[in-house]
Image: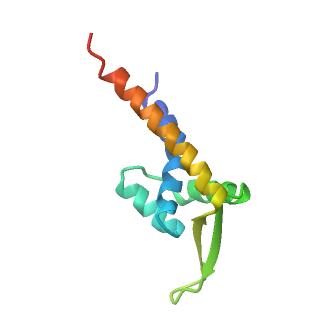
Amino acid sequence: MNIENTQSQMRKGILEFCILSVIRRGEAYPSDIVEEMKAANLNILEGTLYPLLTRLKNADMLTYRWVESNSGPPRKYFSLTPKGEAFYGELEATWTELANAVHTLTNHKY
């Protein structure tokens, strides 16, 4: 069995929740999301992030606004829609339930 593959699948499973967690705190620029994820030791490439952001936007979970930049092209800042807020709440409840279950199972004393 390949541990790297298992680790990758576990990270992919929580990636959307983590990205939405960053955006939920306030408007977020994609490269800032990448940096925040890296700081939390959840490395993500922009090539992985952009398709996820597009999918979430197309599902009406996110919206964005363009902001002019002094050092290049305009920047797209993402924020949660009301539907995205509700979806985040469901993901948070699921995460809490899963984390508690895993904690119970991994710390069970016989």
Q: Picture quarter containing residue 58?
A: bottom right
40 horizontally vs 20: left or right: left
- Please indicate, yes or no, whether residue 33 appears anywhere in the rendered image: yes
Residue drawn where x is 51% and y is 40% of the image: 93
Colour convention: rainbow
Answer above or below: position of 71 versus 1.
below
- Please indicate, yes or no, whether residue 4 appears anywhere in the rendered image: no
39 horizontally vs 22: left or right: left
Answer above or below: position of 99 versus 64.
above
Answer above or below: position of 30 versus 51.
below
Q: Nearer the viewer, residue 55 or 103?
A: 103
Q: Position of residue 67 (x, y in %)?
A: 59, 82
Q: Which residue sits furthest right?
A: 58
Q: Position of residue 60 (x, y in %)?
A: 71, 58
Q: Position of residue 55 (x, y in %)?
A: 69, 54
Count of labels shown? Answer: 0
Q: Position of residue 28 (x, y in %)?
A: 51, 68
Q: Looking at the figure, which quarter contains the C terminus?
A: top left
Q: Picture quarter containing residue 7?
A: top left
Residue drawn where x is 55% and y is 48% of the image: 89
Answer above or below: position of 27 versus 50.
below
Q: Nearer the viewer, residue 98 or 70?
A: 98
Q: Which residue sits furthest top?
A: 110
Residue drawn where x is 48% and y is 35% of the image: 10
Q: Which residue sits furthest bottom?
A: 70
